[in-house]
């Protein structure tokens, strides 16, 4: 079955497109939202607080704090310190005189007594963290001045621009593909929306971006691919309502080929990997030959032969999707090796991981940097 027909049939099963607009109520996080604190003189923007610890005899007061995009608290300190555990979204923490630290779920911030600091959400993201009051018997917050808009822009801008110069080894189109693909792989629809807008604004057509999202289903599944496409539909509709008519672009060119789909896929894989087509089968290809046939016939024949994206762009998208999925280092190793064979440099793959780090956090990028280092050391 042609990939176009297959995808059309799946889309028929989707009865409606769910608008994806982030609110306090729809922001996904593991702890309760709690009560709204704002307006509050110690916060710029809207914030919610939910106490998490009930037993006072444990002497560990904890609360879940939720910030809307751009919200932050004022400069302040704690007489006996504080612990923060990021749980959802993207945020920032900055100590006086130090660069701001970008925070992702799982990050822990240890704040020493009397250190002046602020923390809050990224400009384009909701954020939640658990705040733990240490040494509560003699602790108290000392509130200072608000973090001005200029201070906030400078702090967050410096962090977001950390890799801007280094990442120029990738074209703006390639950077857009990496961002769209990695957010799709993770299933992060909140941040996928501006990434999709960015891809349109650097000149990608609707059909080319759709091709990245279609390609994703082979690596992160139909549900995430479909949700990404639904999100893209919303982006295009919103832009159209604002008078922006994005270029649809050409359709995939049909190819006449006398080879069977298996033979075509086998030959495509040989071309992009540099491994001869007649190399003896090993591993999963022997243990589960059906999946090997599916990979050749569908992935490398049906998908890779669609000409809206080059082989290079598909492989950049693939390693980015895998980075978003996480925990698939062996697959990343295989496709990073293919990237290198296709002429993508180690420096460009490092830039790809810079984008992953800035968008998803170091827990997604660092394991893959280790794999990339192992590959390049062997070359």
Image: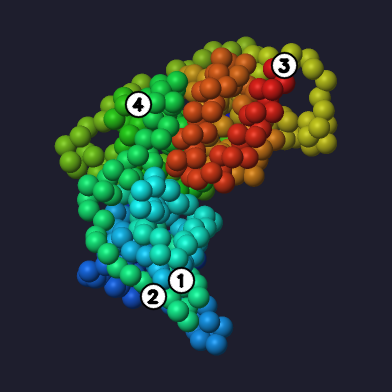
- The residue drawn where x is 82% and y is 28% is 282
Instruction: Tell me, for residue 275, which label it has, or none.
Output: 3
Q: Which residue is mark 4?
A: 204
Q: Is residue 371 visible?
A: yes
Confirm or deny contact between disc 2 and disc 1 (CB under 8 A).
yes
Disc 3 is placed on an element classified as loop
Q: Position of residue 367 (x, y in %)?
A: 63, 40
Please determine whether, in this image, residue 287 is positioned above or below residue 24.
Answer: above
- The residue drawn where x is 60% and y is 34% is 369
First in sequence: mark 3 or mark 1? 1
Could you tell me how far apart the alpha carbons at marks 3 and 2 are, in whole angstroms? 64 Å
Q: Which residue is mark 1?
A: 80
Q: Nearer the viewer, mark 2 or mark 4?
A: 2
Q: Position of residue 77 (x, y in %)?
A: 37, 65
Please determine whether, in this image, residue 124 is positioned above or below residue 47.
Answer: above
Could you tell me how far apart the alpha carbons at marks 3 and 1 are, in whole angstroms? 61 Å
- The residue drawn where x is 55% and y is 18% is 345
User: Horizontal placement of 110 versus 192: left or right?
Assistant: right
Could you tell me how far apart the alpha carbons at marks 2 and 1 are, in whole angstroms? 7 Å
Disc 4 is placed on an element classified as loop
């Amino acid at each position: 079955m042609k990939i176009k027909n297959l995808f059309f049939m799946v889309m028929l099963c989707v009865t409606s497109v769910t608008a994806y607009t982030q609110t306090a109520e729809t922001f996904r996080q593991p702890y309760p939202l709690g009560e709204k604190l704002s307006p509050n003189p110690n916060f710029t923007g809207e914030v919610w607080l939910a106490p998490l610890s009930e037993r006072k005899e444990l002497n560990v007061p904890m609360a879940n704090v939720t910030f809307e995009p751009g919200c932050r608290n004022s400069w302040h300190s704690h007489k006996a310190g504080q612990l923060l555990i990021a749980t959802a979204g993207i945020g920032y923490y900055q100590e006086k005189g130090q660069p701001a630290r970008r925070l992702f779920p799982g990050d822990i911030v240890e704040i020493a007594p009397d250190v002046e600091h602020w923390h809050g959400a990224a400009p384009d993201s909701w954020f939640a963290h658990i705040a733990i009051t240490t040494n509560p018997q003699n602790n108290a917050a000392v509130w200072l001045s608000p973090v001005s808009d200029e201070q906030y822009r400078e702090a967050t801008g410096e962090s977001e621009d950390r890799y801007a110069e280094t990442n120029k080894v990738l074209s703006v189109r390639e950077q857009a593909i990496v961002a769209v693909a990695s957010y799709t792989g993770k299933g992060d629809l909140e941040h996928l929306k501006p990434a999709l807008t960015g891809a349109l604004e650097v000149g990608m057509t609707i059909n080319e971006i759709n091709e990245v999202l279609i390609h994703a289903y082979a690596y992160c599944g139909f549900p995430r691919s479909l949700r990404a496409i639904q999100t893209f539909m919303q982006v295009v509709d919103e832009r159209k309502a604002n008078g922006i008519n994005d270029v649809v672009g050409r359709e995939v060119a049909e190819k006449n080929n006398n080879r069977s789909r298996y033979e075509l896929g086998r030959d495509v894989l040989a071309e992009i990997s540099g491994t001869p087509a007649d190399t003896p089968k090993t591993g999963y290809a022997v243990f589960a030959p059906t999946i090997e046939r599916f990979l050749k016939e569908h992935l490398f024949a049906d998908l890779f032969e669609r000409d809206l994206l080059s082989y290079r762009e598909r492989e950049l998208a693939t390693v980015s999707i895998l980075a978003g999925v996480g925990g698939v280092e062996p697959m990343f190793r295989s496709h990073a090796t293919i990237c290198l064979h296709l002429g993508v440099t180690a420096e460009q793959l490092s830039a790809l991981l810079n984008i992953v780090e800035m968008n998803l956090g170091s827990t997604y990028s660092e394991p893959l940097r280790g794999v990339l280092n192992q590959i390049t050391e062997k070359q």
